Image: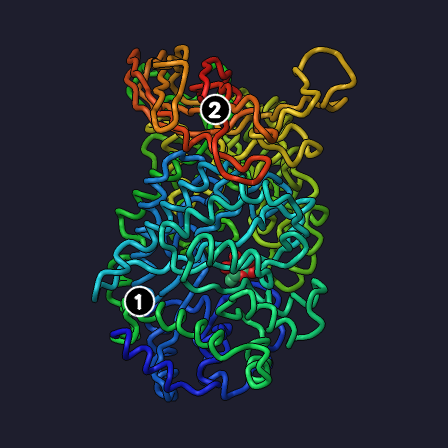
Amino acid sequence: MEEQKLRTLLESMTLTEKIGQLIQVPGNMLNARGQELGVREDLGISEEILRNVGSTLNVTGAAQIRRVQEAYLRQSRTKIPLLFMADIIYGFRTVYPIPLALGCSFEPELLKRLCRATSEESVAAGVHVTFSPMGDLVRDARWGRCLESTGEDPFLNTEYVKAMVEGFQEGLSQEGACRGMASCVKHFAAYGAAEGGRDYNTVDMSERRLRQEYLPSYRAGVEAGCEMVMTSFNTVDGIPATGNCWLMRQVLREEWGFDGVLITDYAAIAELMAHGVAADKKEAARMAMEAGVDIDMCTDCYASQLEGLIREGTIRQEQLDAAVWRVLCLKNRLGLFEDPFRGAREEAEKQVFLKESFRSLAREAAVKFSVLLENKEGLLPLAPTGGKSGEARTGRIALIGPFADRKDALGLWALHGDREAVVTIREAFSETEGLEFAWCEGCETILPEDYTDLPALAAQGERKLWSREERNRQWEQAMELSGTADLVVLALGEDTIQGGEGGSRTRLSLPGDQMKLLREVRKRARKVVVVLFAGRPLVLDEVKELADALLLVWYPGTEGGSAIRDMLFGICEPQGRLSMSMPRSLGQVPLYYNAFSTGRPYDGHTPVRFFSRYEDCPNTPLYPFGYGLSYHSASYGPVQLDGTVLKRGETLMASARVTNTGDRAGSETVQLYLQDVTGSVVRPVKELKGTQKLWLQPGETKQVCFAITEEMLRFYGKDMSYQAEPGLFRVGICADSSGRLEGEFVLE
Ligand code: GLC
């Protein structure tokens, strides 16, 4: 619709119709089967407002969306179509590995492909907006939503968020095209820094840390053109983000120039009262409106208070019109006025849902995101069991563990995934010619002491708890199988319900009887390969000791079982490099590689007391950020610099020779780290500033080059100006963040 006609439409709207556009309601208020997550109060939204609401969430499916949209438009005076939004975080019907796994790819282009594919399925299902990507930087493994983050590194997170926005929105602006869906960058801002790793807890940090480490990923999403931003639940400098004018108006709108739609997180406006900054709904609605919040997700604050605030002049008509205008413009950019059903077509669903190219992409992703943490004596890849005669054989395999045959190992936010379509390890093994194996679960994933709500969930029929007989039978079977097999594949992990939103833990070990199972299997088995499912870093010190090989697959998605089988038998090699540091102990958390030196940096071995260290644990992680093994081995030559001085406006080239010293081709994820040795404020001991993936044949050497520029060296200095400061820098081209920085140059 031309802009002038849209203006005319806005001017023709009544106050109630305008307020309605700023309200988002759960699907069941529109007689649809919504799947909203979150605290639900019965929303006191009037019938009049309900007839004019602007959007709903987690209502999907072409048939359902067409029905709801038709019913809504039939009774609407303005005929402004509903927006359908949904949590499509890492896939729709085809589910890809979780974002924390995506972060292990060091390949933003792959994330773009995944998001483009996800959009194709989502658009067919009638969805207009996805509440993704999440740009929250994470450093605390106790926080269940590490699952949805791409990790602990600001540089990589900006690359990933940019790629995901571009992938989701590709084709969106093409006239008449029903391609792409609007993306919503969340949770603005710094939600991942919740104290104690406890969800929804206080976030408090300096503006410098906020701007330097936490804001860049959201800004990358805005600069990539995201259509929407979502406010976070947490405080920022003592004021909840949803009512924070500095964050939402000065930073987001004025500094970054964001002119898209700002939506709250679920019920966040009402939560301003629980935070203690709003005495009532009227004050809460006023704060959110002043901060520039456009859409109130699932509370009745705007619905019940905005009319009064406008009539008394507390909120100006222009403020209301500006918010409504942004919502109307989004609907217009999506072409909804011309076609309220956009791409929602059942025929299209049948064609695109789980199509082979998406399944193949899911398999590729699961391989590129899985991280090989241990591989003692090169146990992996396993020789094929049914191979040609004389070929080394793996012999009898026992597949044991609660994740041996799990259809639900998709992570909490795979809301719209097709669980029946998931390929489990057992199924993949069964499809593999010549692969003889026996299997059993051995034990459950969690017990009541791991998840206090478990008995209640069981009572509600949401979880099936084993009987004592079942538990004993499974255990005995596991003991018997592990004693007779030549090799045990032990599929262990964190239960899906332990991660994701509201999934904060105070223990990071494998839950339930799983460690006991590992210990007992270890006593009996010749070789043990642990395949680990998780939504966050876990404490794996004992697993590291007991396993002959350890493959971290996160929650690997629809094609997880196939990808795991392909990696175990060497059809492809795991390529993931850790997106988050893995702690030795919970006591180390929060733990991240790009930390400050402190005034008493500990060298890690001298027996001294008065240095920054623990008495009972090294400072280093069990597995560092950027770490991952391969089936090939590689060597890195020394860093070469094409100069020792970098002048502003010029480029310094850093290079190194990387050699595949193994006997099979493989991928190397080469990482560039820099250290600003002295600044007007303390600077991290190292920062990732570039990555490149190399495919190397056995014995092949390639020269990898990185261009270093002054822009890469900028930071918020003592006076908060964002610039590079002259002085000494160190450079490393490494296989992971534990590598040495052996090169040096001076910025003039
Ligand atoms: C949830 C989450 C947010 C999600 C929203 C809608 O509480 O915090 O990530 O997009 O509500 O479901």
Which of the two discs, 2 and 1, sits closer to the camera? Answer: 2
**Disc 2 from disc 1: Cα separation:** 42 Å
| Residue 598 or residue 264, whichever sits in front | 598
Give above or below for 378 relative to 398.
above
Residue at left offset 30%, top offset 67%: 334
| Residue 47 or residue 470, whichever sits in front | 47
Q: Give the residue pinned by disc 1.
A: 334
Nearer the N terminus, badge 2 or badge 1?
A: 1
Residue 674: image tag: 2
Outermost residue, right side:
609
Identify the element where label 1 is drawn: loop
Give above or below for 237 relative to 181.
above
Residue type at mark 2 is Leu
Q: Quadrant of residue 647?
A: top left
Residue at left offset 55%, top offset 56%: 247
Identify the element where label 2 is drawn: strand
Residue at left offset 63%, top offset 71%: 284
Give neighbour class at mark 1: few <14, some 14-19, many 20+ (Cα, 10 Å).
many
Residue at left offset 39%, top offset 82%: 72
Give above or below for 92 relative to 600.
below
Left or right placement of residue 578 versus residue 545 in this view: left
Respond yes or no on whether mark 2 lies under 8 Å from ligand 1.
no
Tell me, yes or no, whether the two marked residues, 2 and 1, touch with CB atoms within 8 Å. no
Residue type at mark 1 is Leu
Residue 391 visible from this viewpoint: yes
Give above or below for 619 relative to 339.
above
